[in-house]
Image (cartoon, rainbow, N blue to C red):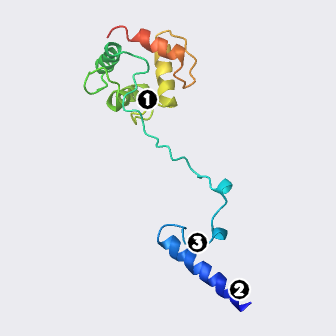
Amino acid sequence: MRNSIMARTLVSVSAVAAIAAGSLAGASASFAAPASDAKPTVSTKAVTPQAVNNLGLNTARAKNWQCWLKKKGFNPGTIDGKLGSDSWKAAQRMFRVSADGIVGPDTIRGLQKYLNGFGYGLVVDGDAGTKTRAAFWQFNANC
């Protein structure tokens, strides 16, 4: 019994020392999780907002959208045909949604409602699908 307690104490001390050193190399196998249980609990994939989201517009049509925003009194920043956060913040202010510069469902719903004001008849669902992109393309034929 005494040898059993000494062995457990020695294994425990080894495990603590190994963890403190940043690895489990010194720990006994009984302290390591089986391979099948060793799964990450969160995704390691980095999530970052897209720097430019033209929603299918080419540079000329994106410039037309920026020009439109400027004419309506919403400053999109540089009219360069790249719909970045400044352009989308301007559009979001025009749509009266949260102006964070990220094109998410609220921004898409705002765009769909806005385009519907010009007779496009889009379903307002927050999805930038084929019909929304086609309407946005057509709307930006000129400034």
Please name the amino acid that badge 2 sits on. Ser
Q: Position of residue 99 (x, y in %)?
A: 40, 34
* Residue 27, label in figure: 3
Q: Is residue 30 above or below residue 68?
A: below
Q: Is residue 29 above or below residue 82?
A: below
Q: Would residue 116 appear left or right of 28 to someone viewing this image?
A: left
- Alpha carbons under labels 2 and 1: distance apart: 70 Å
SS for dot 3? loop
Please name the amino acid that badge 3 sits on. Ala
Q: Earlier in the sequence, mark 3 or mark 1?
A: 3
Q: Position of residue 105 (x, y in %)?
A: 52, 30
- Is residue 117 visible in this depiction of the protein? no
Q: Would residue 10 appear left or right of 136 to someone viewing this image?
A: right
Residue topped by disc 1: 96
Q: Earlier in the sequence, mark 2 or mark 1?
A: 2
Q: Quadrant of the C terminus?
A: top left
Q: Is residue 107 above or below residue 48?
A: above
Q: Quadrant of residue 62 in the image?
A: top left
Residue topped by disc 2: 4
Taking depth in this image into account, of 104 and 106 the one nearest to the observer is 104
- Is residue 48 visible in this depiction of the protein? yes
Q: Would residue 94 appear left or right of 40 to someone viewing this image?
A: left
* Residue 84, label in figure: none
